[in-house]
Amino acid sequence: MSDRLLLLLPTGGDRADAAAHWWRVSGVAVVERGSDAAWRALAAPPGGGPALPLVALAPVAAVRLTWPEPQGATERQRLGIARAMALQDGMADPSTLHAVAGMVEGRLGVALAANGSMVEWLDWLSAQGADPLAIISSGLLLPGSETWTGAVLGSEQMLRRGDLIVPDEPALRDALVGGEEVTPFDEADVERRLAFLADTLPLDLRTGRFARRRLLVLDWGRVRELAALALLVPLLALATALVMLIRLNQSSERLEAETAALASRALGQEVDAAAAAGALDARIGETPGASGSPFPPLAALYQQLQAVPGTTAAAVSYRPDGTLTASLAATRVEDVNRLLLALQRSGYRVTATTRSGTSGQLFADLTLRSAE
């Protein structure tokens, strides 16, 4: 266990007065102690150096300790029931009380304190620049025993027998102890129990609304990593765009090469992609009787096929003299006639011969040529 600082909270302490009883625990021994304000240099160093974890000890009279035995299927249920029972039996409005349940040396225990006391303690500690790791009852200093035991802790005096823990005040001693013997805790016993409390932190009251707030600690190494990643994102986006541009350029070059190869084979001479279209148009224009590009009659035929459902083109070719030939498949002769009349109205001279296929389907072999 690392070194820890235990501080006995003053009763009704003045915010301007930082003096208190304190003990510095290392391992299982108390290595330093005092009853002044020197503890602040250990819990909140003025230069911002490493601080010792602070455990605040609440006055025994301000925290009620009980040891219920509720029934429950799980330990979590038993703890919840025990806490609710303590709030209901607290002899005050439950909304004004704060309770915590937990295991202490193998037994279920509950610590109950007033909300006002918790606020007062935390305000006093905050005024001293301290934020305690835990707040526990100083009454837990005494272990359970079948006989009366007593201890002195700074300004605190306490008595315990069994589950009963009370301040050692004359009236209470006379009423509860009477003439019975009280076994005192010596200094070694007190130091051993202080080390136990610092190590186990039993029934820590810093829960719920009084829980310690987590401080946001920036990891500057991680901040630098995130900054580097933020700068890298635009570079990655640029690199991705460049890769896509290179791929598109390569695809374009491949298509141009294929276009040039096809045109060269059709023309019988080497041409590049840029000159392919012009060279093909010129070759069609040089052909005797040619009527220009095959695309207008082909587009007209395709348009009329779309308008006559059930009619498809089985084969299409274009002759150098400007004639488009096609074999159409249809289910009815009326569909073929509709298509032929539509082509004639579009300004084309059309001839057609029909024949029957082996499957009973009707075929029409037609020629299509501009009427101009």
Image (spheres, rainbow, N blue to C red):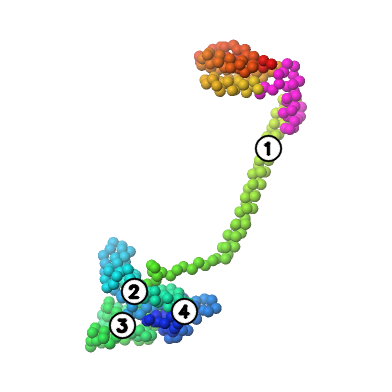
Q: CA distance from mark 3 to mark 2?
A: 17 Å
Disc sitting over residue 252 in the figure: 1
* Residue type indicated by callout 4: Gln
Task: Residue under label 4, please give it.
Answer: 128
Q: x%, y% of residue 93?
A: 29, 70
The span from disc 1 to disc 2 (Cα, nearest Å) is 81 Å
- Asked if residue 304 lies in the magenta stretch, the reply is no
Residues at discs 4 and 2 in contact (Cβ within 8 Å): no
- Mark 2 = which residue? 114
Query: Is residue 351 visible to the viewer in this orientation of the structure?
Result: yes
User: Closer to us: mark 4 or mark 1?
Assistant: 4
Q: Which residue is found at the position 75% from the left and 23% from the top?
A: 283
Q: Earlier in the sequence, mark 4 or mark 1?
A: 4
Question: For numbered disc 1, what is the local secondary structure?
Answer: helix
Q: Give whichever of discs 4 and 3 has the lower sequence position.
A: 4
Residue that appears at 44% across and 83% down: 17
Residue nearer the viewer, 252 or 135: 135
Q: Residue at x 59, y 22 (%)?
A: 302
Relative side of 136 to 332, left or right: left
Q: Quadrant of residue 207?
A: bottom left
Q: Quadrant of residue 363?
A: top right
Residue that mark 3 sits on: 167
Label 3: element kind: strand
Q: Give the SS element for disc 2.
A: strand
> Of callouts 4 and 2, which one flags the residue occurring earlier in the amino acid sequence?
2
Report the front residue among 74 and 59: 59
Type of amino acid under label 1: Ser
Q: Nearer the viewer, mark 3 or mark 1?
A: 3
Name which residue type carries label 2.
Answer: Ala
Quarter of the picture containing the C terminus is top right
Query: Which amino acid type is marked by label 3?
Result: Pro
